[in-house]
Amino acid sequence: MKINLHYSMYLLLVCTLIGCKSPEVDQSVANPNVILFLIDDYGYGDISYEGNTQITTPNMDRIATQGARFTRFYQSSGACAPTRASLLTGRYYLETGVWGVHFGRDFLLRDEVTIADVLQQAGYTTGAFGKWHSGKTWSYYSWSRGFDVGIHPVLYKYWDSRIIYNNKIINFDGPVTDVVADQVVRFIEQNKERPFFAYVPFQSIHEPFNCPEAIFQKFKAQGYSDHVARLYGMIEVLDINIGKILNTVEEYGIEENTVIMFAVDDGPSPGVDLTYTNRRMNAEERAERERGWGKKLRGGKANIYEGGSVSPFYIQWKNQIKPGLEYGQLSGVIDLFPTILDICNVDKPKKGLPIRGQSIWPILQDEDVPDWENRMYFDNTNFYRIPRWTVNMDHPEMREMSVHYKDYKLIRNDRTLYGEDTVFYELYDLKTDPEEQLNTYSENENVGKLLKNEVEQWYEDMLKTGRAFGQAVYEIGNWEEIATPINLDAVRKISGSVKKSAQSEFRFEGWSALGSSMTFDIDVAEEGSYAVELVYSCAPDNFGAIFEVFTEFDTSEVYINHEHSTVSDPLNLPKGKQHLTIQLKKPGPKNAAIDVLQLLIVHRIPNENDHDLLTNPEFVLLNNEETVGHYSTTNSVADMMQNGGKHDELMILNEVQTLKVQAGCDNIDQLKRVDIYLDFEKIETKYNPPFDFYINPPKKGKYTLNVEFTSKKGIKNAARAYLEIN
C-alpha cells in the first residue's frame, strides 16, 4: 500500500495533531515521476548537510532535509562506469560486462536490461542527461538502451564543448552543467502531464576543476587557493543547477507525484585543476579542503575503504516519505532498480538476467523486512590502468574485495598484481570503528572465517557467469552509425613494437617492426562491405607505409599517403562476431609507419542491394536567398570520438532576414520525413517534398542547426551547421 496523495489537508492536520501514522497509499498514485541525480567524484565531505563548514550546498541539503537519508548506501568499485552499470541493471557490475574505467572495460553488455528499458515499456517517457560512460558507440548509447532522450557531453571537458543529443551533435559555450540542467528542465516541462524518468548523471565534479570566473574570484576573496576555489566554484554551479531542476518540479505543482533521489558514483578525488598540468592537489591544498569536512573517512575514489565506497543517498517524495528520517540498513546502488520499479508499480522483468538488488521501499514504509538484517553486500576495486595482458584472464587476481554484514566489513587483499604472492584479510566493526583503523580479523575468528568464505564464493559466482572480464565488442554495420569508432584503449591484443604513447594512454606509438599489430573485437550487424579508416599523425616525408587490415574472413590494405587519416580498400564481412586486426606490412622511408595511431573508424559501404537507403542526403543553407553553405550527413558518434570537444567551424551570418533550408537526397522517394532542430529544439517537421524550410531569424547568438533525415526504413542520420547570427 502507498500513501494517498489526494487526502485532504484536514485529514493530514488531524493526523499531525493526534500523532497517528502516515496514511497508507492507495493505488491512485500509480506511476509517479522519478528524478535520479548521480554526481561524479563526490563524497560526504563536500556537502554542507553532511557537516562541511566551508561551503554551502542548499539544494542538495534540500533533498536531504525534505526526504530521508540512508547512511550505509554503497556504490560499485568506487568508480564511474561500474556504479553506472549496477545502477542501470540492479546487478553487480562484474555480471554486466563492465569491469573497469576505459580500456574497453566500460561497455554495458547489449543483452542487459536497463531500468529505462522496463520503465519505457511501462509507458514512461525516459531521459538520460549527463555523463553516460556505459559504452561509446551508437548501439551502446542511451538512446539504444531504453531512453527516449539521450544528452551526453564530451567526457571531462567542462567548458565550451559539444554534446551529443540522440545521435546529433550540438556545440555550446559556458559550463556544461548549465546546459545539461536546462535540458532536464525542458524535459520536465514537456512531460509534466505524463509519467517520466529523468536520469541525471552530472559530470561535475570530475576533474579538471573549473568554474565561471566570477564564482572563482568569490572563493579566492575568501582566502582559498586556486585549486580549492575552482573546486568550490564547480560545486556551487552544480548545486545551483540541482536547484533549478527542483524549482521546476515545484513550479509545475508536481512535487507530490515526483520522487527525487540523490547519490554519487564514487568517493572524492583530489582532482586535476584546469590551470595545473597533470597535477593533483598537494598536501597543503588537501588539508585546506579537508578542514571543512564534518567527518573524514578512510580512502577516496577507486578505493575499497569507506571513503571510496559509501555514498550519501537521499530520497524525497512529498507526503509519501517522512522528511528528516535516517535509515542505517545496508543498501546500495544495485537496490535502485527494484526500488524504482516498486515505487512506480511496475513489475520486474519476467525473463532475463537476475536482479541482485532489493527494494528499499518497504523500509521507507516502516515495514519489517526480516531477512534484511542478515543481508551481505559485496564490492571490489576495478582494474583501471592495469594492462589486460598482465592479468591472468582465466582467474583474474582481484586486488581488493569486500563484504558488508551487519556492522562488519571484511576486505580481502591480493597483491599478486603488484609482484607479491600475498593474500591477507582485514575485518572492521564499523559501528565502533567507522574510520577503519583497527583490524580485528585475527581476534574475531568466527566472523572473519564466515565472511572470508562468503566473499570468495561470491567472486567465484561472478566468474561462473562468464560475463566478467570480457573486452569491449564494437557492433558495426548499423546504418544509423555508418562509421563506427573504435577507441584504441579497448585493444584485446598487441604485438611487436607497439606501445602506449608517452603522451596518452589512449594512443599508440612504436609502429616500426614488421608484423606489429593491434586486435579488437567486433560484431558485424549485417553482412556487407566495410572499410577501415586509420586516424593518426604522420609527417609527409614518411609517407609510403602499408598496413594490412583483416578479420578471419577477409583482408585488405591501407596505404599511408596522408598526414592525418587513410581509409582501407573494402573488406567483405559476414554477419557476426570477429576479430579485427591492423598490422604493419611495410614501414615508411624513415623505417617507421606513423608517429601515433589515435583511432580506428569502420565505415559501412552501401552496395547495389541497399537501394532503399537514402543516397547523398544533404541540405543547402540560404541567407536572404543567397546560398551560404552545403552540408552532408556525418556520423555523430565517430565525430565525437575523433574531434572531442572541438567546436564545428563557425558560419557567421550578417543581416539575417530569412534563413532557408533546402533538404533532400538523390532518391527522394525513400525519404519519409525531415526534422529541423536549432540546438535542442525541434523547429519543424515535413513529410512530403519539397523539403524547404523557412526559419525566422532567432535572436543574435550561436546555434547548431541539425537537419535530421528519416528514411522509410526508419533509419535516421543528421547533417549540421554551426551558425553565428549577428
Image: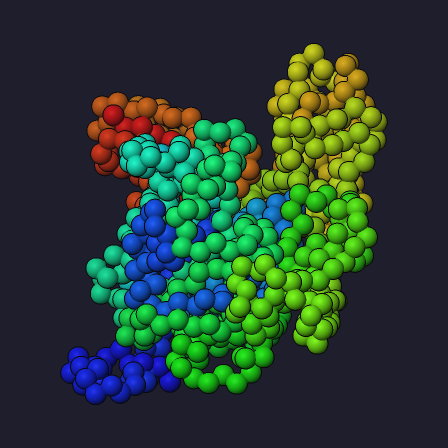
Would residue 726 be visible to someone looking at this image? yes
Would residue 636 be visible to someone looking at this image? no
Residue 278: x and y in percent read 55, 31
Residue 181: x and y in percent read 34, 49
Q: What residue is shown at x 73% (from left), y 63% (from top)?
A: 463
Residue 351: x and y in percent read 60, 74
- The image shows a total of numbered marks equal to 0
Decide which of 410, 664 is in the foreground and name it.
410
Image quarter where the N terminus lies is bottom left
Q: Is residue 659 above or below residue 399?
A: above
Q: Is residue 522 left or right of residue 243?
A: right
**Location of residue 679 by image quarter:** top left
Image quarter where the C terminus lies is top left
Residue reaching furthest to the top: 541
Q: What residue is shown at x 71% (from left), y 67% (from top)?
A: 442
Q: Is residue 301 above or below residue 592?
A: below
Decide which of 117, 446 is in the foreground and name it.
446
Residue 50: x and y in percent read 38, 58
Q: What residue is shown at x 60% (from left), y 48% (from top)?
A: 101
Decide which of 376, 722 is in the foreground and name it.
376
Q: Is residue 373 left or right of residue 387?
A: left
Q: Is residue 134 left or right of residue 625?
A: right
